[in-house]
Amino acid sequence: MQVRVEFTTEPFHGEDDQLPAHVTAAADVLRYAGLSPDLGPLGTSVVGDAEVVVDAVARALKEALAHGATRVTLTLGDVGAAALPASADIVATATDLTDGLSRLIADVERELGGALAGLPRAEKQHAVRLLEERGAFEMRRSAETVAEALGLTRFTVYNYLNRIRDQAAEPAG
């Protein structure tokens, strides 16, 4: 069985080109296992045979913790399970949702005065908050689309969302 594992490690170190030691250490372990990780400052993903990936990711996470990671968030899924049936209704619905998401992104760009990818970090976070408030992330695969519009990784978008949702859940006072 082929699986995809996506994980984020904290602490976050901004969005510069320098990856934290806990990210690079985990990636080295994955590469040593013969895998090709896709990594960024806030997230890593890897696809492969379940036995190889699960064992390698377990070792990679231990290495990340040894190199300063204080928290790990992980998802694992069967690569084949996500395939949709080729139905005209499903395709039409997906197109409608994509168009709706494109409209939401365009609305936020107009509101913030420019393309999302050109905004500074704080404004990108604000854009994610606006899109969250407007239901953009209720749509399937919307994080990838939003990440592309922002010029960020989907992991960064998920982390912005997690912070927004955590702040919303905190009691006032």
Image (tube, rainbow, N blue to C red):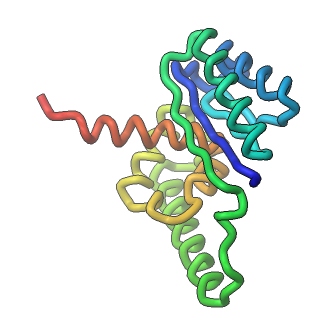
The image shows residue 61, relative to residue 138, as above or below, that is above
The quadrant the N terminus occupies is bottom right
Estimate the x, y position of residue 12 in percent, counting from the top left.
Answer: 54, 22
Q: Residue furthest front?
A: 51
Q: Residue furthest bottom?
A: 88
Residue at the (58%, 32%) spot, across then down: 8
In this rendering, the count of numbered labels is 0
Indicate the quadrant where residue 37 lies.
top right
The quadrant the C terminus occupies is top left
Residue at the (68%, 13%) spot, across then down: 21
Indicate the quadrant where residue 152 lies.
top right
Estimate the x, y position of residue 132 in percent, counting from the top left.
Answer: 41, 53
Indicate the quadrant where residue 119 lies.
top right
Residue at the (58%, 73%) spot, across then down: 99
Task: Give whichever of 74, 168 is nearer the camera.
Answer: 74
Estimate the x, y position of residue 39 in percent, counting from the top left.
Answer: 73, 33
Specify whether 157 is left or right of 48. Answer: left
